[in-house]
Image (cartoon, rainbow, N blue to C red):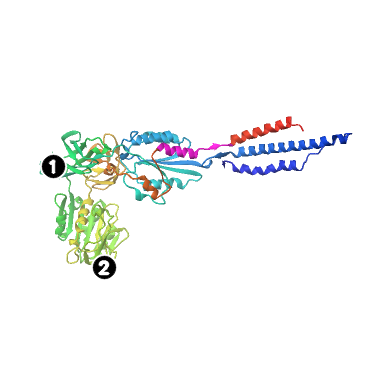
Amino acid sequence: MQFKNPEILYFLALLIIPILVHLFQLQKFVKTPFTNVAFLQKLVRETRKSSRLKKWLILCVRMLLFTAILFAFSQPYFSNKHVNKNQHTFIYLDNSLSTNSIGDKGNLLQISAQEIIENASKKDTYSLQTNDRLYKDIPYSTLKKELLKVKNVSTKLDLISIFLKIKSIQKNKTNTLYKNILISDFQTNYKKKFTNVTPSFSAIKLQSGQKNNVSIDSVFIDSTNKNNFIVNVVVKNQGEAKKNIPIAIFNSDILISKQSYSIKKNDTKIISFTIQNQSNFSGKIETTFNDTFTFDNTFYFNLNSTNKINILSIGNEADFLRKIYAKDEFNFTQSSLQNINYNSIQKQQLIILYELEKISDILSKSIIDYCNKGGNLVIIPNIKSEIKSYNIFLAKIASSKINSKVSDTLKITNINFNHPLFKNVFSKKVRNFQYPTTQSHYPISSKKSSKIVSFENNSSFISQIKDANSRIYLFSSALNKNNSNFLNSPLIVPVFYNFGKLSFQHSKLYYYLGDKNYLDIEISLEKDEVLNISNSKSSFIPEQQTFQNKVNITTKEQPNNAGFYYIQRKKDTLQILAYNTPKEESILNFMNLNSLKEKNRNIHISTSIANVFKDLNEKNEVRWLWKWFLALAIVSLLLEILILKFYKP
């Protein structure tokens, strides 16, 4: 038994007063003279005994009365929680695309939302976390309102982020009891996400009724000739073999071609369509099959007119650059220092200063102006570089400098695999390849640089100088064969190829929702002018950075739905983008929740939302006892009246 006002019980000590009054017989006896004492001796003795019994009965009844009143005012109750503490329930409801499937009771997300509404207590405070929003410290009425509006979204919230949200909500609250409920299909294996410090929670797994799925995994293009190109569609099957599945390709909403295919159990298949060449092709692939997920049966892609990246190399001849920067992707030009066309500098997306002995003032001014307008630069020193001219240039463009040449043979051993330059280059961290070497290098001094590739002594071989307007890459060593064998290294191709590809982000064949996507638009905007992205259903202004000759666009949180979107300047369409749902959402790989108990014993596994809330409500139910004690006080008072009125000794 617990008490809301336990301090009232201190007054129980005052019950000693009526006890003392009765024990010491504070009231005086009245003597009544009587003639025949002998005759009354026995009667007086019996009267005193009856009077004493009556006083004890009255004492007990009054003690019971006062005790019952004190207990009533202290408000006793039975409950698993303290009544003066608030109950806060954190609910994570997974509204990712994978929960848009049919279970035993219907649509997984809609049924889950309805069961929460039906079973949640109307008295508690809640925080509702979905994959796209957090509703913090809301009453039941708001919880119901938001649950009725919840819809599936393409974003997926990492469980680590959910646990951080739980801790942040609980951090600054006192006098509050917490309960955490996670409702999800627990797609993919998150077992490594759970540790001994994971907060306790109740996990409810949503399960689809079907265990097979056909999805369009990806699309790639092959060019056969000037008249046709081939669209290759990668279809993935999870489950039993399937036959005669229809698939069609559209240009926007116009049907171009249709066929059917069969696919083996748990297999992947490529289906090809030959399409007549067109300047712009907004492709939509549709396959028709009744399976677990329907959102992955449509795939969007867009073929914009082919744009090449302009690259200019200034300095010594470098045959390897011409091989790397092939004509189908790049417009590559080499020029000596004496033959530079300065008017062409501003038209480049990447400039390589290749082993110049000296950087002249006129070249320095042109390159600085080029970088300030968003151009990208690679600097490779000469084995006989004039350090003074380099440092004057580097101080202006990157607040950096190179030190005196160090003649020492060093191995190039360390690679920053997390740098964007090496994204998707290595399937794993390579440690056993033949390390290239250099015979000499110029140590780099810069407070704004980050190492991309390093020597064995941890000094930098390739650095990126952080700049708000452009990407600037600085080598510490000449690359000619007399000084280094780096040109023979497997690193040479991905390093320089990605220098070029990252210098200008042309639109891709397609993008995935929820990924951080980058795109450059070659355009000059007026002051305070912005680009927007829209389709027939929505419009938004993306994150963008404006340079003199281009606009860099970044998308992540938006758009929210798959389909075609248009980059617009006012009412003019500049480019068409195609967005698709993340292919990870199509994976029929779900976690076995029973394995969680091995990591955290405080995790409660349940198969029913109703059962979790029923258990929670029962534990939080308060059974008040003050009414019973008040009734006892009334009964005690009545007993005292009856004793005083009818019991006459």
Instruction: Look at the numbered disc 1 and give the secondary structure of its residue.
Output: strand
Q: Determine whether, in the image, residue 125 is placed left or right of residue 551.
A: right
Task: For label 1, count other residues whose C-alpha is less than 10 Å away and answer few (under 14), some (14-19) or many (20+).
Answer: some
Q: CA distance from mark 1 to mark 2?
A: 55 Å
x then y, percent, for residue 405: 25, 68
**Which SS class for mark 2?**
loop
Given the current orientation, which residue lies at the most extreme top position? 646
Q: Identity of the amino acid at label 1?
A: Phe
Q: Quadrant of residue 442?
A: bottom left
The segment highlighted magenta reads: 609-625
User: Which circle marks residue 229 in the picture?
Assistant: 1
- Reading the image, the residue beneath label 2 is 404
Q: Position of residue 438 (x, y in %)?
A: 22, 66
Does any portion of residue 530 appear in the rendered image? no
User: Closer to the camera, 529 or 593?
Assistant: 593
Quarter of the image where one finds residue 532: top left
Q: Quadrant of the N terminus?
A: top right
Residue 58 is one of the magenta-drawn residues: no
Q: Tell me the kind of residue under disc 2.
A: Ser
Image coords of residue 382 (percent x, y): 20, 64
At horizontal 45% and vertical 39% (from top left) the residue drawn is 615
User: Relative to 504, does residue 117 appear above or below in the rendering?
Assistant: above
> Does 620 lie within the magenta span?
yes
